[in-house]
Image (cartoon, rainbow, N blue to C red):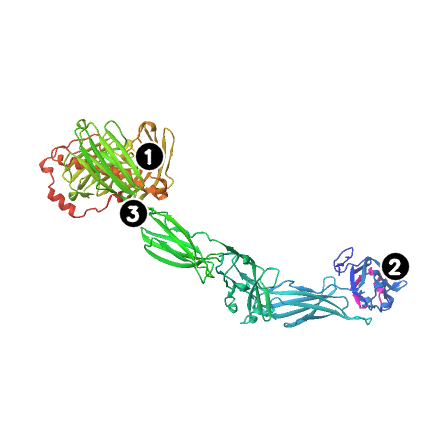
Amino acid sequence: MVGLVIFLLIGSSLHGVLCSTFQVSLVQTVRVLRGSCVTVPCSFDIPSKYEGNLNEQCEAKWVDEDKRNPQLTDTNAVTGDLTKKNCTTTFSNMQPDHSNTYYFRLDCSSSLRETFTTAAVTLTVTDDLPSPTLTPSTLEVNDGDSVNLTCSAPVPCPSHPPNLTWTPTLGYSQETLQENQDRTLVKTSVLNFNASYLHDGESISCTSVYKKQDGSADASFSTTANILCRSCGQFEISLPQTVQVLRGSCVTVPCSFDLKRKYEQYLNGGCRALWVYRDSRDPRLTDTNPVTGNLTEKNCTTTFSNMQRHHANTYNLRLDCNGLKYTFTTASVKIEVKEHFPPPTLTVSILEGKEGDWVNLTCSAPSPCLTHPPTLTWTPKMGDIMETMQMSPNKSTAKTSVLSFIATNLHHRQNISCTATYKMGNGNSDSSLTTSLKNEILFRPRILPSSSCIKTTSQINCSCEIVGNPPILQWFFNEQPVNQSGKVYTISDSLNDTYLRSIITVNQLQDSNLSSLLCFSINSLGSDSKQLFINSPQISADNQVPPRILPSSSCIQTTNQINCSCEIVGNPPMLQWFFNGKPVNQSENFVITDSLNGTYLRSTITVNQPQERNLSSLFCFSFNSLGSDSKQLFINSPQIIAENRVPPRILPSSSCIKTTNQINCSCETVGNPPILQWLFNGQPVSQSKVFVITDSLNGTYLRSTITVNQLQERNVSSLVCFSFNSLGSDSKQLFIKSPQVLAENRGKGQISVFISTTVILLVVVCVLLFVIRFQKTYHDPPYNIFGGKRTKVQNTSEDDISIQTIESIMQMGSLNDDVDDLL
């Protein structure tokens, strides 16, 4: 029914104010069933002066547009109490010719006859009424839920309301009559039941039945809703999209399914799994002797034997049980029959192993048939082997074999192969497929015994042969690195994978004060060296001792100076001062004096005019070939509490850009405090025309950039960024030119080889320098090894420190750090 149009009285709504016009309230449209009754809600109001004319003789008449002749007189109309202004009327046995628009007319006497034209009602007689309304319209439930379903149907005639029935009757129902805002009526029935998995997928309907007054058949109208149980299971299947099988072999199709719980009662020993085409129910692959899993456990995994080319197709699973026959169409499997499989897949746990590392090689081959997996064989057989079966997310299966062994130099580029052998059915020969790889193994260098020298009057000819991965070699002539051929020496190298042979010829020997010729080889795993020629006394390796800075090292600060002393014991003892992270040499601002007595070295430094200098730190660093030690002797600003100190770490963003005439490198380090030193061809770098260095410090972050100019005139071997403080050190080889290591031997991990190379070379140079001159320490004045200008110090007998005392101090605690700890 259409909403009611209510015409309010014009005038005041305050209590006691009288009405001055004729008004009526009617519904606009009413649908009525043919042969049935209908009630038209109606109320009216009249001017107050006519109130006395309302009595029991008043009649309600319904007229059409001519507003004179009464209509619907044959419908046995029954009207409410007009004296109470209730004109609600019930018409019986309505027929199609009663369909029209009607006005209410009040007929009381000659003094009160009025047709209310402000509103009219349109009656439509029809054979159909609206179907009942179900709320909610979609019934989604869980197993065990308490469900309320409401059915509502219009009531055109309150004296003959419709009967509401539920099909099926799932629970109890309760009926009520409700009045709408327009005073029409609705009958409702609320059904309450507990949802069960048995209801899943079922339909429930509500039917409204209207009795006729003309003797014709009752009219009924229905509405249906489907019950969906979210927790009661669904028809689902899990299948791989594609499986591949060798012709003549077997294949296993992994399969599992689920179904609505109410159908689980049909899963029994009589069920069959049929494999069909999507649009057919005829079983296929019946000639492959299919073997299926336990269907009562919803396992439809099936193995097919002796697969041939004509079996290649796409298949769906059809479940065939007593009381349940269902084809799963949400997923299908495509079976591909192949003549050959791809070779096994070989993967290695690390792209580039190191000597001593555990290396895991994994061989993986598809295993289409679980009952006949391939046999995986390693050649050569070495290490431990573990085999497993694995299933990928796409349901395909593979057999894997993991070969584990400890890497040695013998494994470098050794050909390792994995062979997958498939057994074929019906007497066919086996199918074998092989994959090989050569693993890269990094191992420490070793100088071969064949390395030697031949000396003539004017020349020394030496050859040094090493094996290592990578093989890196450096010659040292009189404790200085030799980087290129020249008039004095000629170098030629021969590289063959991990073998390197270098020949050096030293000319004009009579003009050279030749003390020693050293072959030194290094990479990230270790180093080796050999003294091929020596012309002066040596320090026996058995007598060498790592350095240790004594606790007596300290500083005294005055207004204009800082005076610090650093005392070390070691054999040989070597020492370098660092001021604000830079190496310090003798100058007007820095006065350095050294006092050497055997294995004891005392170095004092005076920093002048500190008020004019941005002094942050003064650092004493001691090292030799056996280890190193360091001590922060002075720190000004910002203050660093010991527990807040952090060892330095060079960031991965450090890198170089090379042009024709320049190398531009940046090194970024974090530490507390951050101290950084550039090393060029093994030597510390200071600001100059050739080297332009700029630093940017922000708390614990330091970024240093260096530009190497006149590159074409320089023999650039290496550029190293070295960062350290009292807690540790870090280094990175940012540029290296020669010798080259092939990229395939290095990989990304090879960068670390060059990070430490030049720093260790610098250490070795210093060791050799002291070794050669050790015998002179009781005759020549001591000097700072790294100092540019040497300051002689005369030792007096009362200042001498006995060797016995020093040896006892050394026994109190020696450092066992190797050179790698410095790096």
Quadrant for the C terminus, please. Answer: top left
Q: Image point 88% across, 63% down: which residue? A: 70
* Disc nearer the start of the sequence (1/3): 3
The Cα–Cα distance between marks 1 and 2, rounded to whole angstroms, is 115 Å
Residue 674 image position (x, y, % from top left): 32, 40
Closest to the observer: 730 or 409?
Answer: 409
Closest to the observer: 349 or 334?
Answer: 334
Q: Quadrant of residue 598 in the image?
A: top left
**Left or right, residue 268 beside residue 641:** right
* Magenta region includes residue 80: no
Residue 480 image position (x, y, % from top left): 23, 33
In this rendering, the label closer to the viewer, 2 or 3: 3
Amino acid type at circle 3 is Asn
- Residue 187 vs 767, above or below: the answer is below
Amino acid type at circle 1 is Lys
**Left or right, residue 619 beside residue 232:** left
* Secondary structure at numbered mark 1: loop
